[in-house]
Every structure is written in structure tokens, then in C-alpha cells.
Image: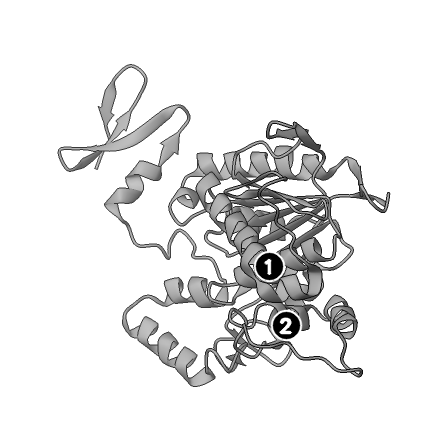
Amino acid sequence: MELITENKNNTIQDRIDRMWKDDLYFCTETNPMIFFSEFSDTHRKIMKILNSPYPFTLVLAPRKTGKTPLTKFGYIIKRICFDVESYIIYASESQDEAKKHANHIIKNIEKNERIHHYFGKLVDRKNLVTRIGECQFTNGVYLGHKGALQQSRGTQELGDDALTVSPPSLIVVDDPQSNKNVKSETLRNDTGKWFEDEVIYSIARKWIHPKTNVIDRGKVRFIGTSLHSDCLAERKWKDPRFKKVRYAALIDDNGKPDHKNGHSYWESMFPTDELYDELRAAIEADELASWLQERQNIPRTSTDQKFDVNDIYNWDLGNNRFDILNDEPVLIQEQHIGRVAA
């Protein structure tokens, strides 16, 4: 780590005060190796809505916007360092994926000398619960993880000392669906029910900060990409309870998606000319719908999607399922196998 210098006009406390007021300054001051490129206006707007007072917020942004690093190493770590939360849950598509992201946060706080310089050492493996993807920090904040469809509410008892933390003060839901499982209507419905029953319900109860005694209700921060016209992100986009924003790679002067006359949302990382080169290549390859989904956050419709024989495994009909037998699709029912008419 390079030497962090200070003088009477730029003390540690001055920098901490500025980090509290400026989210993007916190990012670059604590993790310059991660946030090495100049931020765009989109990144500042993402941080603004994450820090808004609304209980439910949704950030719909295409891949490669940096939304996950910004959320993990900016929003969440800042709230841990400044002791704003009591119990944070990081939720993702699977338990392994959520555990990986939560562990990235823990490792960064544990090994980051810049965070130690400003906020002290917040990880104490000898005396406090610390394992892969779970940690009680020295200031009392607890971070855990959950996979989609796992229970998120209720009291958690951890370790031999039965540490109790309940209910969560913040749940971050990061891409709870994949390109594969979003194709199944049953799994889409299951994920929607999980979100209502385990995420929304779990923050309905009030929580009290153990040090300040501040009483508040929990928050849900949903960051995702539009993978399907009926994916969870699109369902929540229509949900009036959510304060939401939608971003794209090519935008107009008002920040709205525009892939005809727009410019790059992040010129220093993805120049406008390169994005239009991508667009032209996608059109020539008959992959426009795919490009619009990946870059512009516009979900493909069923008529846009090319048939893939492996998609048969994601078809569902009640308790029955589809499979492939002798290179042809079949419907597997409870009592017999019926061949699907061609």
C-alpha cells in the first residue's frame, strides 16, 4: 500500500468526513485498485438510489456496468465501516454465489490496509464469529449470505456462543436468477414467492441498533439485469412499492436508453464508437435481440429467442416435466411417458 499522507489541512478525520458525504470518494479512497477508472454519472446515480430513504429500491443495469463491485465494495463496506447497520444479508442466485460475494467483502475489510488506517481492524477471527461468507465485525455489524429460495427472516444463532441477530436491517439481492433458470415459469414463480415471503416479509419487523438504540425498519436493495420479460427484476419494475431506475450502455442526454442516437454511459471504459461497432456486428450476426438485452437492458421476447434443444429441460407443466428421448422431446408424466406431437 502506498503511504497515506496527511497535513493540518487534510487530516484523517477530514477524509473520513468526506467519505461519509461522498460515496464515490469512499470507493476510491478505500479501494483504489478496484475503482481505478473514472466514474460515470450513472455510478453516482446508482449510489444515490442505494442510499435513498426508500425501503425498497431496484437498480436495473446491464452487465459490465460495475454495479456489483460498486454495491459490494462501495455501498455495503461503507455501511459496515460507519456502523450504520446491524445485520446485513447478501442474497444471490445460489448459496455458493452469495457466499462468494459475502466472502469478498469480508476478505477486503480484513486485508485492506486503507480501511485499517481509517476505521481500524474490523475482523477478529480469534474472538468473533468469522467463517466463509459470514462475519461479526468488531463494531458489532453482522454480515451473512443466502441463496435464492433460502429462508432470510427470523433469528440466526451462530457459533458456540449462540450469537443472536434478528431481524436483518439490510438485504441486498444481487441477480437472483440466471439465464438458465429464468426460462422456467415454475422457477420464476418460486423465486417471486421467495422474494415476497422471505425478503419483503423479513424486513417488515423493526430493528434496533445495538449501540445507538436507533429504531428503524429494514431495507431491500435489489440490483439486477433484465434476463426475461417475466424475470423477477421486471416483475419488481412494475411493483409500485419500489423506487427504481433503469440504465443502459447507450443513453441520451437525459440518461434514457437510446441505441440509435445515444452516447456511452461510461466513455472512459466503453467508448461510444466501440459500442456502436458491437451493435452493428450484432445486427449482421442476427443477434440484435441478444445485444439489446446484454447492453441496453431490454429483455428478449419469446419470439426473439432462438430455439435451443436444451431449453426443453426448462419447460414445465404442473408436476410433469419434459425430457429428450431418442433425440425427440417427450413429456414425462406421473404414470407414463407421452411423446410430444411434432
Q: Is residue 140 above or below residue 118?
A: above
Q: Is residue 97 above or below residue 330?
A: below
Image quarter (top left, top right, bottom left or bottom right) of the N terminus: bottom right
Q: Position of residue 215 (x, y in %)?
A: 85, 42
The amino acid pointed to by label 1 is Thr
Q: Position of residue 305 (x, y in %)?
A: 35, 54
Residue drawn at x 49%, y 44% is 99
**Residue 225 left/right relative to 342:** right
Residue drawn at x 67%, y 79% is 5
Image quarter (top left, top right, bottom left or bottom right) of the C terminus: top left
The residue to which callout 1 is attached is 71
Mark 2 vs mark 1, CA separation in Å: 16 Å
The answer to which image quadrant residue 324 occupies is: top left
Callout 1: helix, strand or loop?
Answer: helix
| Residue in the foreground of this view, choosing between 124 and 301 | 124
Q: Is residue 276 above or below residue 257?
A: below
Residue drawn at x 39%, y 63% is 289
For label 1, the crowd category at 10 Å Cα-Cα, with few meaning under 14, some 14 to 19 and many 20 or more, is some
